Amino acid sequence: MKSPRTFLLVFFLCFAVLLSIHGLINFLTDPFGIFQKYSPDFLEPFKSDRFLTRVGKAELSRSGKCRTILLGASTVEVGLDPDSETWKHKPVCNLGLTAGNILELEQVLKLSISENPDLKEVVLAADFYAFSDLEDFKHDFAGSAFNPDLNWFKYYFEALFAERTARYSYLTLSQYFANAPPLYTPLGFRIGHHNPNTLKKVLESIELDSKNGGILGSFTYTGKRIEEFKRILSLSCKATERSSVVILPSHALNLEYYRIMGLWETYWKWQKDLVNAWSQISEDCKQNVSIWNLNTYDGENLISFDDPQNQFYWERVHFKKTMGDRILQILNGKALGRTSNFSSLQDVENLRSKLEKDRATWLEKDRSIRDFIQEVTKSRTRVGLAQTN
Amino acid sequence: MAGCYFLTSYGSQALVVSWLILASLVFYAWDFPQYLFLLGSSILVNFTIAQLFLSREWTKRLKLSLLWLGIGFNVFLLGYFKYTNFFLDVFQDLAETQFTFERIVLPLGISFITFQQIGFLMDAYIGQVKDLRFINYALFICFFPQLIAGPICHHKTLLSQINEPNSISINSRSMLIGSVFLCIGLFKKLFIADAIALFVNPVFDLAESGKGITFVEGWLAAVSYTLQVYFDFSGYSDMAIGLGAMFSLRIPVNFRSPYKSASITEFWQRWHITLGDFLTKYIYTPIHIGLHRRFGKNSVLVRQSLAPSIAILLTLMISGFWHGAGFQFIVFGIIHGVALIVHRFWQRSTIGRRFASWPHWILVARTMTFLFIIVTLVIFRAGTLQAGFSYVQTLFGLHGFELESSVGRKLPIVVLSGLLLWIHLLPNSQELMQRVTVGVPTENNADWKWYHFTPTFRWAVACAFLLVLSVACLSRTQEFIYYHF
């Protein structure tokens, strides 16, 4: 090139053209569903990876079509089917967030109320893990529309030009060309991602978590997150027709994990706090808010992971759709041919004594599990700022 | 930049300099407006002392007192803002107390600004500064490309350029050189270093939390961090050079392919060159001369061995502590100091000279030097000294040779190997830009003539491509590693 001016001209032109092409591909592919109006419909089923991110879930909430929303963590995401026949108000949006906590759920509800004028029902899955004092907004929450302080310029800039968007565009397009099945349904329900676990693997995971701390190693509960829970209930009461709070079931071995980690008393204290908060809010609430604890020491919650008939649990925390459908039947008041004695949670002490009895029966029958629990409890480690007061 | 372009076309150099000072101050105040006063007063005090040196003949004693006053002022600022938290933490640990205190936020670039001003004062003291105008001095200190993480500019490099009439100008040639350097720097920082950080941080966080890391993930993260810190800091330096070049100002080179070094001495001549120059001139040399004068007149041992060794060790300790307020930085400095001393003796020994004449020695020396850097940078990166030592033990297999990794994300081996080949075989930015960057010190390397940047269509497209990749990575930016040093 003869002159620096020509070089600069070519440089800036190339930059503008390349950046525009990059932006246009991301705009049309629209992997997070931000520019849904302009994106071709045939790509829609292949964008399901978007729900791996909070950005994608927030866009589902912003779609404005939700009449029922499901709030919670990954148990909601993988277990509760929005397309179930039992729902009264459809469409149902599964807004369960992977490792979501109560701080985040408050913002999810606020956004959903403001963006969905026809919102009738809220199901809040209260997850013990989500109430740790140490919980904070997760990394990609800040860049999603759930964040009330979102910088919208940055949001759209990243939607067009960011490397992450390009990565998800590439995923979408490669799944389209490979005709790969989606990870999620269009309403945010995660399907087919878990590998079934054997009992040996589940016990190994408990042993490992008890040694290295796992998620509960630094669990700290003083009840300060109950305030967010109250605000969620209160908001839901004011803005919708029906609200339910549910402690979703986990396998009995997961309850044992709480016990092994020295958090059994904390677990029940947390439930008492939930019930107290629930009764305070319910007094001022015109609707009848139901509250459930679906954890038991019988029926499906005791099924062996090695049982070929295990249609209920992926592993000790996450349950399968079959179990989810049973839960939805209970929540939505449909007839249930159940084996577990699922209960509502108004009387915590009663529920506890019932569970303790069932547990004793279970461990009497299965002594190898009892020995395992005793052994692991001895060697457990609690790290960090663990407190259980 | 538009304002500067307008003023260079129609205004005087003084207006251009004032405009750049204003822009630099706005840049500085963007995140920490409360420290603008600190920057301003620091510039004012140092300028006043330097001006006093120039304005009249002082007695030697008074002049020395003034110098110490100036150095004391700078060291006090650095000490207060950078080390107060550290010393209070150490006190708490020793006294086993738990009082709470408001932690001091480190002002942007204070370490760099302090060293630059101390160097300037010392040169003014010995009469090397002849011409001094306030606005030029202010720009010399706060010129935004070098304000937050260096390079530590010597007044002969930058201030002398600013003092020249009409030296600051924006033209197509300066924009060309500046843009290319900027693109390379942005690419190094945003596309490479920040991507590596995503793999490195979880492993170091795990190590710091007290949970064990495996042999393999330890080495992968350590090598990755070695690459990250280079691409991060040299990327920043390239950006500074590029931004300076846009205004026709030549910012000194800070890196010359440091990982190609065949000894630790060579490494410090190629790594953070401006810091090395500062330490040599203003710390090592005075200590060495002082020891030599005091103890070395009658002793060959002191003159040839002890004095330089002590000076090296003290200099590297100061260098380590300058990098950060933590014991791990001091230990990093001490280890490097000891390595420099050992290398010094090795070079002079018969066996050292014999090895040096062996044709393949360079390969062995380079490998050993690189491995040494990898291991010592682990201590530098670790959050605490204890975590650093534990990590190093893992690298030496003292915690077993487990090959599995508990951290999900790892830098793919192909990428890691590619980056290693890059830093060991390919030319650096200055070598690449040799044909066009007249005036910026470069290393003449005839082997790479085919690779040199020329303003061709292909280069324009390549640079635009690098810039697009960098823009795409803006959303996942990490702080510059040297940002808080």
Image (spheres, rainbow, N blue to C red):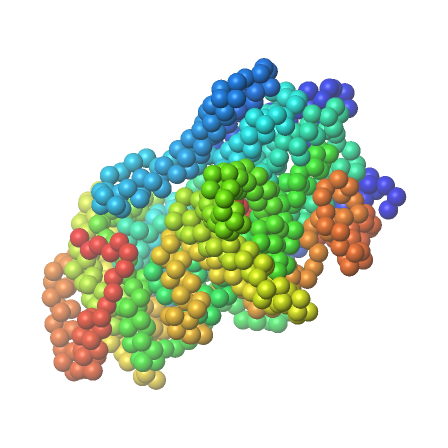
State the residue in front, B81 or A61: B81
Residue B416 seen in this snapshot: no
Residue A222 appears left or right of B484: left
Which residue is found at the position 35% from the left and 63% from the top?
A: B211
State the residue in front, A375 or A141: A375
Q: Tell me how many marks there are.
A: 0
Up-down relation of residue A249 to residue A71 (above or below): below
Q: Position of residue A143 (x, y in %)?
A: 49, 48
Up-down relation of residue B470 to residue B245 (above or below): below
Which residue is found at the position 57% from the left and 69% from the top?
A: B413
Up-down relation of residue B439 to residue A68 (above or below): above
Q: Position of residue B290 (x, y in %)?
A: 49, 38
Q: Position of residue A262 (x, y in %)?
A: 19, 63
Residue A210 seen in this snapshot: yes
Q: Position of residue B344 (x, y in %)?
A: 55, 55
Up-down relation of residue B11 to residue A384 (above or below): above
State the residue in front, B274 or B21: B274
Which residue is found at the position 72% from the left and 41% from the top?
A: B440
Which residue is found at the position 37% from the left and 58% from the top?
A: B387
Q: Going by the picture, which residue comes out furthest to the front? A: B298
Q: Going by the picture, which residue comes out furthest to the top? A: B56
